[in-house]
Structures are given as C-alpha cells and as structure tokens.
Image (spheres, rainbow, N blue to C red):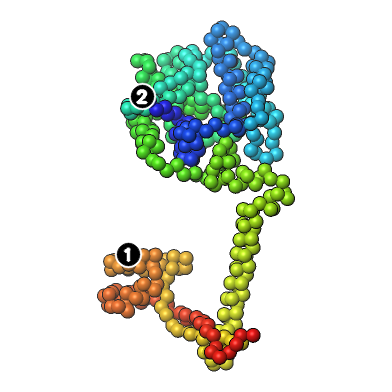
Amino acid sequence: MKRYSYSRLETYENCPLQFKLRYIDRIKSDTESVEAFMGSRVHESLEKLYRDKLMEKTCSLEDLIDFYHSNWDKNLHEGVIVVREGYSLDNYREIGKRCLESYYHRYFPFDHARTIALEMPIEVPLGVPGIKFVGFIDRLDQREDGTYEIHDYKTSSTLPHQAKIDQDKQLALYQLGIESLWDDVRDVDLVWHYLAFDKELRSKREREKLEMIKKEVISIIHEIETTDSFEPRESPLCGWCGYQDLCPLKKHTFKVSRLPPDAFIKEDGVQLVNRYIEVKNQMKALKQEEEQLKNAIYEYAAKEGVNVINGSGYRVRIRVSKKPKYPSISGDRERYSSLVEVLKRAGIWEEVSKLDSNRLVELIEEGRIEEEVVREIKAYEEIVEDKRIFTSRIKGVIEK
C-alpha cells in the first residue's frame, strides 16, 4: 500500500525532483529550515494548551511560553538553517513566542467549542486501489450546534487572500476524511489560524467542490505513479530546499557558496563562466563596431558612387536592393493584426505563420495566392532597402 499525503503532493507540484529524492529515493536531508523548526515548536505548544484543557487544566501563558522555550532548546540542532539574510535563530524564536502570546490572548479561556481530537491522524477515502491518503488534523472541534471545525495552525510570514483559502485542498481533503468516520458530520467549517498576523480565516466546501478536489488529487497521484521524469523546478522556494547539493540547478551554487574567495575565483566552473561572459561582452562590442563600420561603408559607397571597395588583401561588394516588408507584431500591431486576418481568410496563414515576410514574398512570386488577395496584401506592403556586404579575398595580393 503506497502512502500519500497533502505535503507529498505539494512537494511534487513544487518540485518533482525534490519529491523523488525525499519520498522515492528516501534520502534524508541533514538540514531543516528555521521556519519549519519554529512551526513545529509552536504546534507542540498549542497541542499542550488544548491537551491540558481536555484534562480540565488551564495552562497559564507563562507555562505555555516556558514549554515553548524548553522544547526549542531540546530540539535545536546544527542543521537548522536561516535562509533569509540579516536574521537569526533568536529572531524566529521571538516570532514563535509572539504567535503563542497573540493566540492565547485572543482565544482564552479556549472553550468556544468541544475539542474532539488533537494531532489527529486521518485517512482520506479516495477509492484508489493500492493508495492510502493520510494526514494529521491539528485540532478537530465540534460546536454546540453540531458543526465540526477543522483547525490548522500556520506560522507563515505571508497572509493569503481569502480567494486562495477558498481554493485550498488540504483541509477539504480532511473534511472528506472525517465525513467517513461519523454519521453526524453534516456541516463543516475549515479554519486557518495565521498566527503571525493574529488572523483567523474560514471557508466552506460544497459537495461538488469536494468531489472536484478528490478527482484532482487522484489525477496528481496517477501522474506521479506513471511518470519516470522527475525534473527539478526552480522557484523562490529553492533556498529552503535540503537537497541543493543533489540538484543540477543548484548543485554548483551550493558548492561554490561555501568556498573562500581565493578558492572561489580559481574554481573551474567559475573560471569558465567568467571567461565566457568576458568573450560574450567582447563579441557584443565587436558586433556594435561591425554595424558602425557597415554604415560607414554604405555611406562611403554612396558618396563615391561605387559598389566595390578594396582593402589590403580583401575587398567588399555592396549590394543595395528593394524588397517588400510587411507589418510585424513588434511594430505596428494594428496593421499586423489586420493583415493576419486577411491571410487567415485566404487560407494561407499557416504557411506564413508568425508572418514570415520572406515566405509571403515567395508565395506571391510563385503565383500561389489569388490576385484579389495579393492586392489586399500589397496594401500592407512597404518597400525597404536591403543592404548587404559580401567580402572576398583579392587574388594575387598577399595580406600584410
């Protein structure tokens, strides 16, 4: 039986390679982001708060904060990393403390509903043979009116819009899970606590939406089960990934970021890239100079009335001709769109898709476009000068 969870699916959608390394290859990362570490300590503290309540004990704020700090110290390890520059472990420790203090003051004495379960393991009935979809509900409550509440604690530094909350899959899947456990689950509120903002967000899911989410999840699982390609996907989340040393997009960055300055500048890859950029910039400068020289040659040829100019061992031949040019998408967009409509009506758009002026001229010259359509096309035509320079070695002259 293969196990899936919302976090696994989220990992796959964020980066298939990370999913493979973590869940298929089962490679353990020796690092943990401070955000994840702090989030775990806050969750443990809120679990204690409500577990005490279940035992008819009200945990004081002082005891709650002491518990948080004690767990922080006991669990802290060298692999906890701070990605955001300019901040420290102590900064995040204080954020977690503030989250707990705000929550405590907001919900004390924690009796708005009956707590059914804490850190509750849940299985979501997807109906897919060989697949078990599981998760954990932070807190499950039931109000006096019979409504169930699925609570989720978030220590994220970003507050989502309500529209995003209304599209969230995780708690909706957990709703499917609790509906399979009890017959009285009819009305369910999904509740997110964004602790860093002292903000509570709520949402509901209609039956049609729940079934759609279920189908989407089954589709993602099917994709994972049938693919043999787990490519890395670059995103702002990469800095928090514990597999950067194994990722082809981040491996070199990870390697050289740990080198001292003198070793960094001597590293083979660094030297290759530096030299490549140096050459690329030189070529760009030479290309600009080439264009300037071309224009100077055109001007000289026009002034002297010549088509051939000799140099020391080489000569250049200048050819100036007139050729049709048609509107482009990067130029006059209105004329471009209008011409495209003409070509589509004539049934030749596919042959000149992206409006290839050279191909369009060929079709006209080959007589493959009706005269009436040609006349329409000609209305968009502009005759421009096509200037070209051809170089050749002068026979019998030795280059100095």
Count of numbered circles on the image = 2
Q: Quadrant of the C terminus?
A: bottom right
The answer to whether one can see residue 212 in this image is: no
Q: Quadrant of the N terminus?
A: top left
What's the residue at 65%, 13% (across, down)? 60
Q: Dot 2 surroundings within 10 Å: few (below 14), some, or many (20 or more)?
A: some
Q: Is residue 59 left or right of residue 387?
A: right
Q: Earlier in the sequence, mark 2 or mark 1?
A: 2
Q: Quadrant of residue 273?
A: bottom right
The answer to whether one can see residue 352 in this image is: yes
Work out how far the residue at label 2 is from the one at label 1, CA to CA, in angstroms: 49 Å
> Residue 350, labelled with which disc?
1
Identify the residue under disc 2.
125
Q: Is residue 273 left or right of residue 149?
A: right
> Residue 10, labelled with which disc?
none
What's the residue at 58%, 15% (across, down)? 48
Q: Nearer the viewer, residue 140 or 34?
A: 34
Q: Nearer the viewer, residue 30 or 343?
A: 30
Q: Is residue 116 left or right of residue 315?
A: left
The spot of residue 146 in percent (x, y) is: 41, 15
Type of the residue with mark 2: Pro
In the rendered image, the vertical position of residue 104 relative to residue 35, given as above or below:
above
The spot of residue 106 in percent (x, y) is: 59, 21
Q: SS for tag 2?
A: loop
The spot of residue 341 in percent (x, y) is: 33, 65
Q: SS for tag 1?
A: helix
Q: Dot 1 surroundings within 10 Å: few (below 14), some, or many (20 or more)?
A: few
